[in-house]
Amino acid sequence: MELEELVSDAIKGDDGAFVSLMQACKTDLYKTAYAYLRNEADAIEAVQETTCRAYQSIQTLQHPEYAKTWLIRIMINVCQTELQKRKKVTVHPFLEDERSVDHQHSTIETTEALESLSPKERELIHLKYIQDLTIRQVAEVLEMPEGTVKTKLYQSLSRLKRWFEKGDDQHVSK
Amino acid sequence: MYQNEKNRLKEYKRSLEQQPVPEELLDDAILSGMKKAQQKKQPAFKKWVIPLTTAAVLVFAFVMTVRVSPVMAGHISSIPGMDRIVELIRHDRGLQTALENEYFEQLDVSRSKEGVIVTINSAIQDEQGLVLFYTVEIPEPVRDPFFSVTELLDENGNKVKASFSTGSGVGDDADPESTLHTGSANFFFEKGYSPGRELTVVFGDRQNQHVFDGEIEIPITLSTEKAETETYELNKTVSIEGQELTIKEVNISPIRASVELVPDPDNEKKILAYEAMKMTDENGEEWKQSTDGLTSTGDAEARTVYFESSYFDMPEELSLIIGKVQAVDREQEAMTVDTDTGEVISAPDDSGITFTSIDRLGLELEINRPDFGYSLFSQATDAEGETVDIPSAGYRSDEHKSMMNFTFENGDYVNPLTIDFAFYPGWIESDEVISIYQ
């Protein structure tokens, strides 16, 4: 069945359609969760929580054509809440040693750089560069003008750039 | 620009894609997540769309357990579909007597789109407002139907200047298998304003259930006759537990009675809502304040509260009793939260409100008393002074507590958020009898 058909059946209260919808989106949801939480167990739990929240509010879904992005946004929110909880109990999970292994740099550094962004900036970067939404799609799901999306994207990229530069400086000076 | 950063993000994306996906564990998580939601669900939140005009005040409709349908005069009850309309206004004695006195016009104008047929059946108009009764026929039943009037346009296609409330889904319509829904839209005009006779009623699918796309427009022409409003100027001040309140004026027309109230700006408490005002006559007959849909307009400085009308039953003497009033100390009229950290920065001390969830998308809370069906918030202000609208809220209640959720329109705001109370679970009371006329 087409995704949109599943979505409209799910909105009408068809549980089977809802499960199929979640299954169709599970890979993207899991990867989003993994990007934020960085371990399998937490990511699976986040998928469960996202399913629960989505089930409770699917009738309020405004644009069925963006159901997947709507789910991703719920997931990002679930993850950000989880990260917030973690901040209170744990210190930084990366060891200094990890940073010095050159070929792993990029991914770990990118993760750290992404974590330095505000929740809003990170969501924007995630939707545009990880989920590969177009500027127009991002504008529609976040309900802001395309110009604003572009400006905010560039602000976020520039913040990443500054972070990378600063990060490299620290590395060199070691 | 930022090619290096984009490349890093690409590489990061690739590494994510290489991550193995625990397919079966995810399927389990989906099923258990759904089960969790079903267990949590209890009675569903009743949904309300909050009008963007903050001046309009909405009260959640209670599901009435006692249902008494009024008996209508023979002629009226023989009009097809009238039984459903009578059911719809069974809480409003004023509208019932208007119908009994044949103060309404039969319109029966239909338009259809994609198999959906919308009919404006009849209208009641006067100098204070307009009530439209309509039916919507849909090809297949949908869950939680909410087809309603979204706009009223004048003969030039401009939006009519009016607050309005609209609702459907009572009685037989609440049946999820039903394909015929009856509803009403209740417009409130400011004094001296008239939208003219040639109007266009715009219908939308407020829950976005995609039963039809876009909107359905229905042109109607109203008659020239309007009953004249009875106006009583009072300018009387009463003291309610130390808070001064002036009753300026009472207007009574067939659709409704309205009372204009102005609290003293120097009061220690901010008056938020009048919960149980009533009008009484010399024999103890009562006309109640509207308790459903739009119950008042205005703001804390000046408010107009609506009542069912006594127009067709004017007694010898009519008096007003203020009753219970929601009020909050001026120092605590707003609360502050940080939705990134989930922290409540400031809130009234003994309000009985507990937050159960705070995040960037919205808030969930509990109030330690049942049946508090008032939407606590309708708008927030962010750290930069920008308004963050709360376009929808949910409400449910069990025997011990009331639960509400609020969704922010736009996640693009800067914390902390300051949220003014539109309603508040704290009261002052007056049972003084104030004469409207003798």
Image (cartoon, coloured by chain):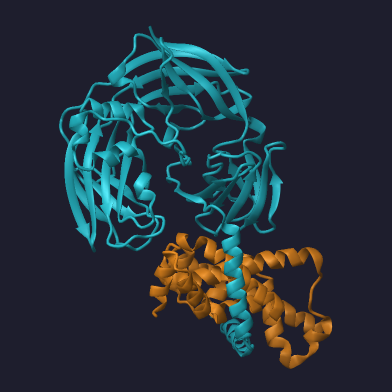
Chain colours: A orange, B cyan
As drawn, B26 above or below B275: below
- Residue, x 34% and y 9% (percent of image)? B316
Q: In which quarter of the image is the C terminus of chain B?
A: top left
Q: Residue at the far bottom: name it.
A: A103
* Vertical comparison of B243 with B184: above or below: above
Give the image location of residue A19, x and y in percent. Answer: 51, 74
Give the vertical position of B436 relative to A114 (above or below): above
Q: Nearer the viewer, residue A129 or B17?
A: B17
Residue B413's x, y, as percent?
A: 57, 56
Q: Can residue B10 be seen in this view?
A: yes
- Residue B185 appears left or right of B343: left
B231 left or right of A75 in image: left
User: What residue sits 60% from the left and 39% below the top?
Assistant: B370
Residue drawn at the location 45% of the way across and 64% of the way down: A13
Q: Tell which residue pokes out farthest to the top in this image.
A: B438
The answer to whether residue A157 is seen in the rendering is no
- Pick the residue in front: A55 or B172: B172
Q: Tell how many labels.
A: 0
Give the camera-side residue of B197 and B99: B99
Q: Which of B73 and B187 is in front in this view?
A: B73
Find residue B124 and report its image quarter.
top left
x, y percentage for residue B368? 66, 40
Q: Which residue is drawn at 71% across and 78% down?
A: A41
Task: Indicate left or right for B320 with B270 as reference.
Answer: left
Q: Give residue A91's position: percent from left, percent from top.
A: 81, 70
